[in-house]
């Protein structure tokens, strides 16, 4: 599958971003070539009238202000619940192992955070495509409420084939993947809380010798 073009403010780019389509997939629906869509998004060409009518059917499904579809779902941040911090030691102690563990916690949390971000981005893209496919099926079906093109048998069959291609490429929701993301978020929260606790503990330890010398 070809790589998507660079970000563009064109209507084609907005439609592709909303439905999670590649340039090739949008071009298939518009009955154009992928290269032609790339030229349109880059401002080098204009959309032909027949393709523009097809594109308008999808543009009407965009969230306001571009269209009249439902608003995009907000991105929810993963909540964290830091553990209760322990009190500092009453006597000096060897802090090198604790410093090492604190660094290890930070590094593990960072690595897991990158892994979680990749999984979340992939899941968000897949969810966007599933949501977009459902919208497209409803809007482009035989009983669609808005028909800007004459529903000829050839056009109906062509759009049905395109929707079938999108459905074949869609990835169903994976409960196991969702559970994996939850576990990663819990591990990151635990490691971050441990590192923060060690940081406070070590701050208390560093002050003990000074207090004893007064």
Image (cartoon, rainbow, N blue to C red):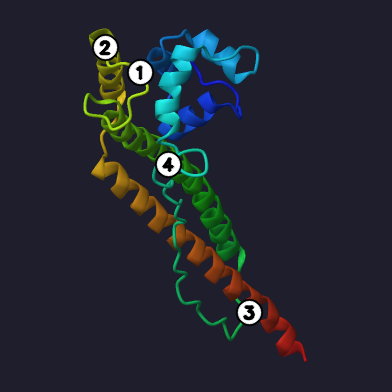
Q: Nearer the viewer, residue 129 or 41?
A: 41
Of the numbered discs 4 and 2, the one sitting upstream in the chain is 4
State the SS at label 2. loop
Residue, x 57% and y 82% (percent of image)?
Answer: 89
Quarter of the picture holding the C terminus: bottom right
Q: CA distance from mark 4 to mark 1?
A: 19 Å
Image depth: mark 4 or mark 3 in front: 4
Of the numbered discs 4 and 3, the one sitting upstream in the chain is 4
Residue 204 badge? 3
Residue 98 vertical placement versus 134 (above, below): below
In the current view of this chain or complex, which residue is farthest to the right?
Answer: 214
Q: Which class describes the residues within 10 Å of circle 1: few (<14), some (14-19), or many (20+)?
A: few
Image depth: mark 4 or mark 2 in front: 2
Q: CA distance from mark 4 to mark 3?
A: 58 Å
* Residue holding disc 1: 149
From this viewpoint, is residue 94 visible?
no
The reply to whether callout 2 and callout 1 are in contact (CB within 8 Å) is: yes
118 left or right of 44? left
Q: CA distance from mark 3 to mark 1?
A: 74 Å
Residue 152 badge? 2
Q: Residue 196 placed where, x, y %?
A: 55, 67
Q: Nearer the viewer, residue 27 or 192?
A: 27
Q: Which class describes the residues within 10 Å of circle 4: few (<14), some (14-19), or many (20+)?
A: few
Q: CA distance from mark 4 to mark 2?
A: 26 Å
Image depth: mark 4 or mark 1 in front: 1
Of the numbered discs 2 and 3, the one sitting upstream in the chain is 2
154 left or right of 4? left
């Amino acid at each position: 599958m070809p790589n998507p073009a660079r970000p563009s403010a064109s209507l084609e780019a907005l439609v592709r971003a909303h439905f999670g389509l590649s340039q090739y997939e949008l071009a298939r629906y518009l009955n154009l070539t992928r290269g032609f869509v790339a030229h349109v998004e880059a401002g080098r060409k204009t959309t032909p009238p027949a393709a523009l009518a097809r594109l308008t059917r999808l543009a009407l499904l965009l969230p306001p202000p571009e269209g009249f579809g439902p608003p995009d779902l907000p991105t929810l941040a993963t909540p964290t619940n830091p553990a209760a911090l322990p009190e500092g030691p009453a006597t000096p102690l060897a802090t090198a192992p604790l410093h090492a563990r604190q660094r290890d916690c930070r590094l593990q949390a960072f690595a897991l955070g990158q892994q979680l971000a990749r999984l979340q981005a992939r899941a968000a893209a897949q969810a966007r495509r599933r949501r977009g496919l459902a919208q497209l099926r409803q809007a482009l079906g035989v009983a669609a409420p808005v028909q800007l093109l004459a529903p000829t048998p050839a056009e109906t069959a062509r759009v049905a084939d395109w929707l079938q291609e999108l459905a074949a490429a869609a990835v169903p929701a994976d409960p196991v993947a969702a559970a994996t993301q939850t576990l990663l978020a819990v591990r990151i929260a635990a490691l971050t809380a441990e590192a923060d606790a060690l940081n406070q503990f070590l701050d208390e330890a560093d002050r003990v010798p000074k207090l004893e010398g007064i």
